[in-house]
Image (spheres, rainbow, N blue to C red):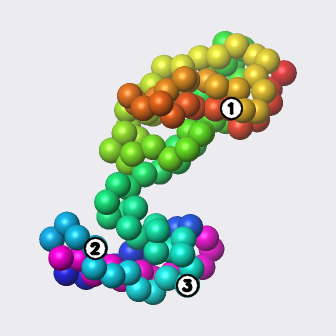
Amino acid sequence: MIKELTCICCPMGCRLSVETEGDEIISVSGNTCQRGHDYAISELTAPSRMVTTTVRTSEGVSIPVKTKSPIPKEKIFECMDEIKKAEVHTPVRTGDIIIEGTAGTDIPVVATRTIA
């Protein structure tokens, strides 16, 4: 079976063709770099995404946050539910951990901007 993907690792947006046989990946083609090859394998075996959004502060300002690394795709809604419930007090610095581990993972949610 051939699965078609578009690589999201860089602006090139390579059209990838992944040949599979059952759960086994036979070949990846269409990528112009190793990142495209690695993306295709990851997307078919364990898809993950960065989550970016905002968190409320007790002072009424929202601060931008993101997961420190990609989380499993099936955990995105659980992660967003936890972030919606979160509230922080300023000051907050870029990189401060807002949630220690989200959606049952050890991946923290961190601030992406400093708010005094």
Instruction: Name the residue rendered at 47%, 30% in the picture.
Output: 106
From the viewer's perspective, tell me whether residue 29 is left or right of residue 12.
left
Is residue 62 among what the camera can see? no
- Image-based side of 69 in relation to 47, left or right: right
What is the three-letter code of the residue carrying label 3?
Thr
Q: Amino acid at mark 2?
A: Ile
Give the camera-side residue of 68 and 51: 68
Residue 111, which numbered label? 1
Q: For residue 13, what is the image quadrant?
A: bottom right
* CA gap, disc 2 and disc 1: 37 Å
Residue 108 visible within the image: yes
Q: Earlier in the sequence, mark 2 or mark 1?
A: 2
Report how far apart the C-alphas of labels 3 and 2 lie in the structure.
18 Å
**Residue displayed at 37% across by 39% down:** 75
Note whether 24 is above or below 73 in the view shown.
Answer: below
**Crowdedness near tag 1: few (<14), some (14–19) or many (≥20) residues, C-alpha within 10 Å:** many
From the image, tell me which residue sits under label 3. 32
Where is residue 108 drawn, in percent x and y?
55, 31
Label whose residue precedes the other's in the sequence (3 or 1)? 3
Secondary structure under the numbered disc 1 in the rendered image = strand
Q: Residue at x 40, y 41 (%)?
A: 76
* Picture coordinates of residue 56, whole percent (x, y): 62, 23
Q: Quadrant of the N terminus?
A: bottom left
Q: Hey, which quadrant is residue 110 in on the image?
A: top right
The percent coordinates of residue 60 (x first, y second) are 69, 18
Q: Residue at x 54, y 71 (%)?
A: 35
- Mark 3 or mark 2, earlier in chain: 2
Contact between marks 3 and 1 (CB within 8 A): the answer is no
Q: Secondary structure at mark 2?
A: strand
Magenta residues?
Answer: 10-21
Q: Which mark is residue 25?
A: 2
